[in-house]
Amino acid sequence: MPNPFPGMDPYLEGPLWTTVDNNLIEEIAWQLAPKISPKYLTLTNQRVMVATPDALELSPPGIRVPDVGVYDTGGEPGSATAMATAPLVMDALLPESMTQTFVEIRDVAERKLVTAIEVLSLSNKRGEGLEEYRQKRREMLASESHFLEIDLLRAGERYPVAGVLPSTPYFVFLSRANRRARVEIWPISLDQPLPEVPVPLLPGDPDVQLDLQEALQTIYDHYRYDQSLNHSGTPPLSLSPELAAWAQERLQSVRRS
C-alpha cells in the first residue's frame, strides 16, 4: 500500500523514524545533486552523539514476565539458597552512540559550506540529545552558511522563534545567512502534502527547489514502509481526537479503494 496520507504519515513517528530520517536525508541529497551541479557538491555527512534513546525511538518495550516459581541459583528448590524471581524484567535505557546523517552543500571551488540541511530525530528534540543539538544549531546560526531544518516530528522542542507558532504538527524552518534576524517558516498540516521549499546557494545564484513530498514518497515506496507499520492500530504518538478521527477515515477510504 502506498502512503495512505497526503503528506506525512504519523505512524512513522516511532521506532522506524531512526531509519526514515537517514533515508530521507539520502533522498534529499539525490534530488538536489543534479540541480546544483557542476558548481556545487551535495554531500551527506555524519556525526555521532551519545545519549539515552527516546522511548518513542525504541521498538515495543522489551518487557518480559519471568516464569512463576523460583530462580535457580544452584540450590535445591525451597532451600535457603533459592531466590524468588523478580516479578518484572524490562530493558534498561542506557546511553548509546547514535549516528545522525545530514546534507551539506559545498561550492566546488573552495569546498566552502554553503547550506546545511537537517531532518530532525527525536533525540534532537528532547532528552539528553536536545542540548547537544541546540549547540549544533547555534553554531550553524553563527556561521556564514544557510540552515534548513526539517521537523516532521510532533514530539519535542521546536526551532526557537519569537512569538507563538501555529498549532500544526510539522514545520520547515529556513535561516538564510544574510537574514539571520528572520526565519522563513512552512507550517504543515497532517491533511496536506509536504511543501516544496527553497534551498539557498551563494549570492548571485537562484534558490533551488526541494520537493519534500516527492522525497518522502520515494523512500516510502522504495523501502515499503507500509509493510513495517501497523495502520490498524494507533500511531506511536497519539493524535488529537479530531485528527485521529480524520486519520481513521482516511485509512478506511484507502483500504476500500
Image (cartoon, rainbow, N blue to C red):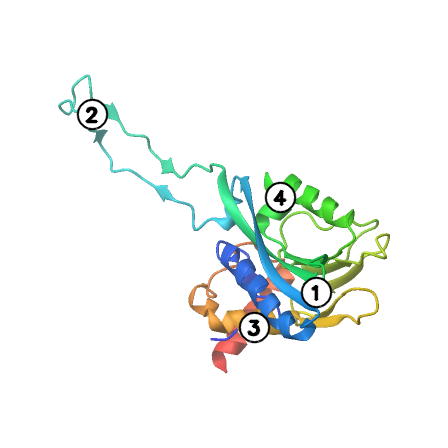
Earlier in the chain: of badge 3 and badge 2, it is 2
Residue at (55, 57) in percent of width and height: 13
Kind of residue indicated by mark 1: Ile
Q: Residues within 10 Å of mark 3 (few under 14, many from 20)?
A: some
Residue on which the image places disc 3: 217
Kind of residue indicated by mark 2: Thr
Q: Position of residue 190 (x, y in %)?
A: 65, 66
Q: Position of residue 173 (x, y in %)?
A: 74, 58
Whether residue 232 can be seen here: yes
Q: In the current view of this chain or complex, which residue is farthest to the left?
A: 76
Q: Residues within 10 Å of mark 2 (few under 14, many from 20)?
A: few
Earlier in the chain: of badge 2 and badge 1, it is 2
- What whole-number distance in Å separates the C-alpha atoms at marks 1 and 3? 16 Å
Q: Nearer the viewer, residue 98 or 161?
A: 98
Residue on which the image places disc 1: 188
Looking at the image, is 52 positioned above or below residue 245? above
- What whole-number distance in Å separates the C-alpha atoms at marks 4 and 3? 27 Å
Left or right of 71 in this view: 165: right
Foreground disc of the pair 1, 3: 3
Contact (Cβ within 8 Å) of mark 4 with mark 1: no
- What whole-number distance in Å separates the C-alpha atoms at marks 3 and 2? 54 Å
Residue on which the image places disc 2: 73
Q: In the current view of this chain or complex, which residue is farthest to the top?
A: 80
Residue at (61, 66) in percent of width and height: 29
Disc number placed over residue 126 in the picture, else none: 4
Q: Secondary structure at mark 4?
A: loop
Q: Residues within 10 Å of mark 1 (few under 14, many from 20)?
A: many
- What whole-number distance in Å separates the C-alpha atoms at marks 4 and 2? 41 Å
Contact (Cβ within 8 Å) of mark 2 with mark 1: no
Residue at (32, 40) in percent of width and height: 65
